[in-house]
Image (cartoon, rainbow, N blue to C red):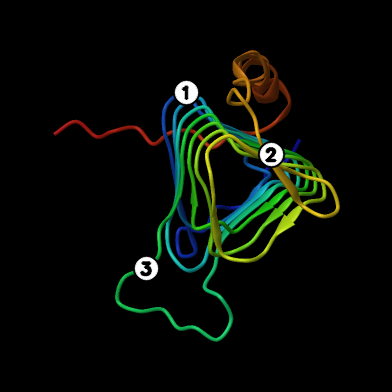
Amino acid sequence: MSSTKQLDPAVCNVKVTSGAVVCFEADYYGDITIGARTVIHPKARIIAEAGPIIIGESNLIEEQAQIINRLPEGTEAGDQLPVMVIGNNNVFEVDSYCQASKVGDNNVLEAKSHVGPGVELTRGCVVGSLCSLVCPQVVQENTVIYGDELHHRTQSEKPAPQGLQLDFLTKILPNYHYLIKPKKKVAA
């Protein structure tokens, strides 16, 4: 395995917390903070064009998942950059796309789901496979969105945490991929 890709500090500032497994082969752009126990697979894309992205703890971001903080077309950046905040224990499955303004805790974006700008996922929400949320809205707690017509229903419990999968990936991914290590603090 050769490591020819560079994380150019001119375009990329990735801050990794101790305990996170962040594969080097993913695409990163902008100011990104990654919390403890978060796993980012190779080929994921995290793009912070409009402002920083803060990813909480114990999130799983799978292959080809895209998390993008971008200004909507036709708008210009003001004095304050919009910060995209992603809570804890979220799952971004294969080829999901998220441009939500805020993602709370315990949400699941299933494979090939699409969450556009102006959407806010609260807690315990599931966006089903191939579902596309493009109109600005706040999705209420424990809502499941599914089907071609984007049916909504409320589930009685939040989605199960992915603790076992995170533990497994934390052990396996370092054996086969280069990782971005947390920066060591300089003693004063």
Residue 49, given in percent of the width and then of the height, sits at: 51, 67
SS label for mark 1: loop
- The answer for how far apart the CA atoms under marks 2 and 3 are is 34 Å
* Contact (Cβ within 8 Å) of mark 2 with mark 1: no
Residue found at the far left of this picture: 188
Could you say which quadrant of the image residue 132 lies in? bottom right
Residue 178, given in percent of the width and then of the height, sits at: 64, 34
Name the residue type under label 3.
Answer: Leu
- The answer for how far apart the CA atoms under marks 1 and 3 are is 28 Å
| Residue shown at 45% from the left, 64% from the top | 10
Task: Estimate how packed mark 2 is, as few (under 14), some (14 to 19) or many (20 or more) residues with alpha carbons within 10 Å.
Answer: few
| Residue shown at 46% from the left, 30% from the top | 57
Q: Which residue is mark 1?
A: 19
Name the residue type under label 1.
Answer: Gly
Q: Which residue is mark 3?
A: 81
| Residue shown at 69% from the left, 31% from the top | 177
SS label for mark 2: strand
Q: Is residue 5 left or right of residue 17?
A: right
Task: Estimate how packed mark 3 is, as few (under 14), some (14 to 19) or many (20 or more) residues with alpha carbons within 10 Å.
Answer: few
Mark toward the start of the polypeptide (2 vs 1): 1
Task: Estimate how packed mark 1 is, as few (under 14), some (14 to 19) or many (20 or more) residues with alpha carbons within 10 Å.
Answer: some
Q: Quadrant of the N terminus?
A: top right
Q: Which of pointers 2 and 3 indicates the residue nearer the eye?
A: 2
Q: Quadrant of the C terminus?
A: top left
